[in-house]
Image: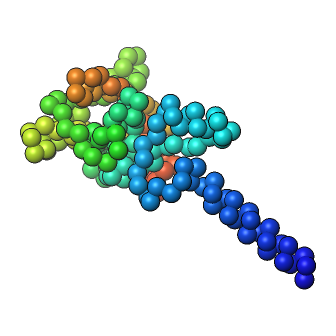
């Protein structure tokens, strides 16, 4: 009986200890907090651990791309059925649309002899006539991203007078879709 009581007390103590570590910063009530590189890196070093501050999925279920020091984000969606690559510009929270005046963005892909540039055109304008969505319909691009895990497209964007560069790649591990072989 004494062993069982000791086991349950030890189990309860471990669970309480683990629940205290899970938040690392206390209960924030589920509120969204952006990663502060300087502050969080110092916190991690001080406490002898690291966190995976990966971005995961965006509001359109696409892969998130950090622009600058998380000043902005881009989200890339591969619409394989429509042969589209769609890029959404988002704020620091990776949720809020950020519209810019550009009518297109250039996407540079590796080519056989030299890089190949593709134009992502502005989608439907937002309320102020600017665009936060850019896309291209190209079976060639979808095939390149889909079949070549090393295919990386680079783009540059100016937001609020500041230049940012991002890289687009197709992460086959983050989503579930069927790959159909062409005949």
What residue appears at the point 38 percent right and 16 percent down from the top-left corner? 114
Figure quadrant of the N terminus: bottom right
Residue 20 vs 111, above or below: the answer is: below
Number of residue marks: 0
Residue 23 can be seen in this image: yes
Task: Name, please, the residue furthest toward the bottom.
Answer: 1
Name above or below for residue 119 compared with residue 7: above
Q: Quadrant of residue 161?
A: top left
Q: Nearer the viewer, residue 7 or 64?
A: 7
In the image, residue 65 lies at what x, y percent? 40, 37
> What x and y, as percent, mark residue 88?
28, 42
Structure colour scheme: rainbow
Residue at the spot 35% in from the left edge and 33% down from the top edge: 71
User: Residue at position x 60%, y 55% from top?
Assistant: 22
Q: Please give left or right for residue 146 compared with residue 72 in the image.
A: right
Q: Quadrant of residue 42?
A: top right
- Can you name the residue that lies furthest to the right here? 2
The location of residue 163, given as percent across then percent down, is 29, 22
Res 119 visible:
no
Q: Residue at x 76, y 69 (%)?
A: 11
Can you give x and y, in whole percent of width and height, for residue 35 in the image? 46, 40
């Amino acid at each position: 009986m004494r062993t069982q009581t000791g086991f349950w007390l030890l189990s309860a103590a471990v669970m309480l200890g683990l629940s205290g570590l899970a938040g690392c910063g206390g209960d924030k009530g589920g509120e969204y907090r952006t990663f502060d590189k300087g502050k969080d890196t110092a916190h991690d070093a001080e406490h002898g651990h690291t966190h995976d501050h990966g971005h995961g999925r965006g509001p359109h279920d696409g892969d998130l791309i950090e622009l600058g020091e998380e000043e902005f984000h881009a989200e890339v969606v591969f619409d394989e059925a429509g042969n589209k690559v769609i890029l959404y510009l988002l704020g620091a929270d990776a949720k809020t649309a950020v519209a810019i005046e550009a009518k297109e963005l250039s996407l540079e892909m590796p080519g056989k002899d030299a890089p190949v540039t593709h134009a992502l055109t502005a989608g439907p304008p937002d309320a102020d006539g600017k665009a936060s969505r850019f896309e291209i319909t190209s079976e060639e691009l979808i095939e390149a991203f889909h079949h070549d895990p090393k295919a990386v497209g680079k783009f540059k964007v100016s937001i609020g007078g500041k230049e940012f560069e991002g890289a687009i790649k197709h992460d086959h591990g983050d989503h579930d879709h069927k790959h159909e072989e062409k005949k």
